[in-house]
Image (cartoon, grey):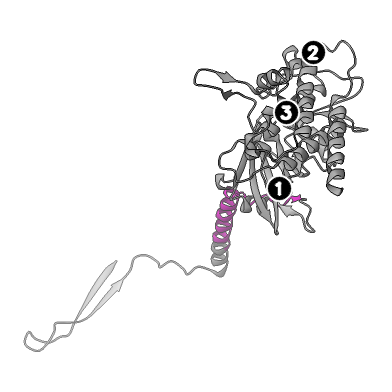
């Protein structure tokens, strides 16, 4: 770069000596960007912005078609996975309403309808496939004493079961949870036992798809807004045919509800009968089968108490004390004897050397007869 100074031609006392400065650069100024260059830069900026936006959407789980997959919950318009995630706060603990052996259950209200969403926790692909097959089979079944399975959602890493929502939680919650405000009178308890029996008969004697539940317990008996009992949680359920009565099992079952046949590693529909007998005892007595404190030194189990009282002819003493005298003693004795029969029969016949009568049918018919008699007396 060259700098030139120009003199004004005047003396020291007649003004400035320099009149102008000239700068000559030794390089060429860069040319202005062409319209093409400007357009390319603009396009590149937009692409970068879109990529960043897509990355954000992917991290938030908004990308792909999975979140748009339609899920039928019995409304005019199907819902999407995104909607279920939104209403459960992405399966937040705040929306949790229960825990099961195979997952967590969340409450979800979509388009004014409340449903229960069970998120399966099993990481075994084989087990997931087994559950899918069993639940698709269950979806084809329809009976008033089985919890209705509305739809199933399956995607990589996410497996959901959407059920009808049961407003009064489980029988176990009503009987044993100190926080429960639900009080079951005698008529409600009787109808609950009758409902369970009807549900089991349907499962065991379905004309095409006979099923053994294998996990009948008070926690798996849910109550709707009218206290109707509905059997739920079919995670351990198995289909069987008349030629395939015996099933080898490799799963744990709840303590206290375990039929004697489980010790030998086989199970038939009769195992549900044993568990049903235990649930009847719990329902009538208001006590848990796992053991209650008789005194400061010893625990007493419900079945032991029932057997002992039956031998003494005082089985009615097992009726929940909170009912006071507001129950039918005749009905109580019949239903308690039925419960004991369900469990003792299994103990005496656990070798299965000969065909057995359908105890669940006997149970259901006995309960129906009681129900008819009770309604007839009310009419009179």
Question: Is residue 66 shown in magenta?
Answer: yes
The mark that comes first in sequence, 1 or 2, is: 1
Q: Quadrant of residue 253?
A: top right
Badge 1 crowding class, 10 Å Cα cut-off, few under 14, some 14 to 19, many 20 or more, is: many
Q: Which mark is residue 215?
A: 3
Above or below, comparing residue 305 to residue 179 in the picture: above
Q: Nearer the viewer, residue 206 or 223?
A: 223
Q: CA distance from mark 3 to mark 2?
A: 21 Å
Q: Residue at x 87, y 48 (%)?
A: 380
Q: Nearer the viewer, residue 157 or 10?
A: 157
Which of the two discs, 3 and 2, sits closer to the camera?
2
Question: Is residue 341 shown in magenta?
Answer: no
Q: Position of residue 338 (x, y in %)?
A: 79, 26
Q: CA distance from mark 1 to mark 3?
A: 20 Å
Write down the residue under mark 2: 348
Q: Which mark is residue 165?
A: 1
Q: What segment carries the magenta color?
A: 43-71
């Amino acid at each position: 770069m060259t700098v030139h100074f120009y003199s004004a031609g005047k003396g020291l006392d007649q003004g400035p000596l320099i009149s102008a400065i000239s700068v000559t650069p030794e390089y060429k100024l860069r040319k202005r960007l062409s319209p093409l260059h400007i357009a390319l830069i603009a396009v590149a900026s937009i692409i970068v912005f879109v990529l960043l936006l897509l990355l954000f959407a992917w991290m938030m789980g908004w990308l792909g078609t999975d979140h748009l997959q339609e899920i039928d919950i019995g409304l005019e318009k199907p819902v999407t996975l995104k909607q279920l995630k939104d209403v459960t706060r992405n399966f937040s603990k705040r929306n949790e309403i229960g825990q099961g052996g195979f997952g967590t259950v969340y409450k979800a209200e979509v388009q004014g309808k409340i449903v229960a969403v069970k998120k399966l926790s099993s990481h075994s692909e084989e087990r997931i496939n087994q559950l899918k097959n069993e639940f698709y089979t269950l979806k084809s079944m329809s009976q008033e004493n089985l919890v209705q399975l509305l739809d199933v959602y399956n995607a990589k890493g996410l497996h959901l079961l959407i059920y009808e929502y049961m407003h009064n939680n489980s029988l176990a919650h009503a009987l044993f949870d100190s926080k429960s405000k639900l009080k079951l009178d005698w008529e409600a308890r009787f109808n609950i036992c009758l409902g369970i029996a009807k549900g089991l008969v349907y499962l065991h004697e379905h004309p095409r798809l006979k099923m053994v539940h294998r996990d009948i317990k008070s926690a798996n008996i849910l109550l709707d807004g009218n206290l109707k009992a509905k059997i739920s949680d079919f995670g351990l359920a198995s289909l069987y045919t008349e030629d395939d009565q015996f099933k080898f099992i490799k799963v744990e079952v709840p303590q206290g509800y375990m039929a004697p046949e489980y010790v030998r590693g086989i199970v038939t529909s009769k195992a549900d009968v044993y568990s049903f007998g235990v649930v009847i005892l719990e329902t009538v007595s208001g006590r848990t089968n796992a053991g209650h404190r008789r005194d400061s030194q010893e625990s007493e189990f419900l079945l032991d108490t029932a057997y002992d009282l039956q031998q003494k002819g005082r089985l009615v003493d097992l009726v929940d004390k909170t009912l006071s005298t507001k129950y039918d003693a005749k009905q109580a004795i019949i239903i308690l004897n039925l419960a004991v029969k369900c469990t003792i029969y299994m103990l005496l016949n656990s070798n299965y050397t000969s065909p057995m009568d359908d105890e669940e049918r006997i149970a259901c018919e006995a309960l129906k007869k009681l129900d008819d008699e009770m309604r007839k007396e009310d009419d009179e």
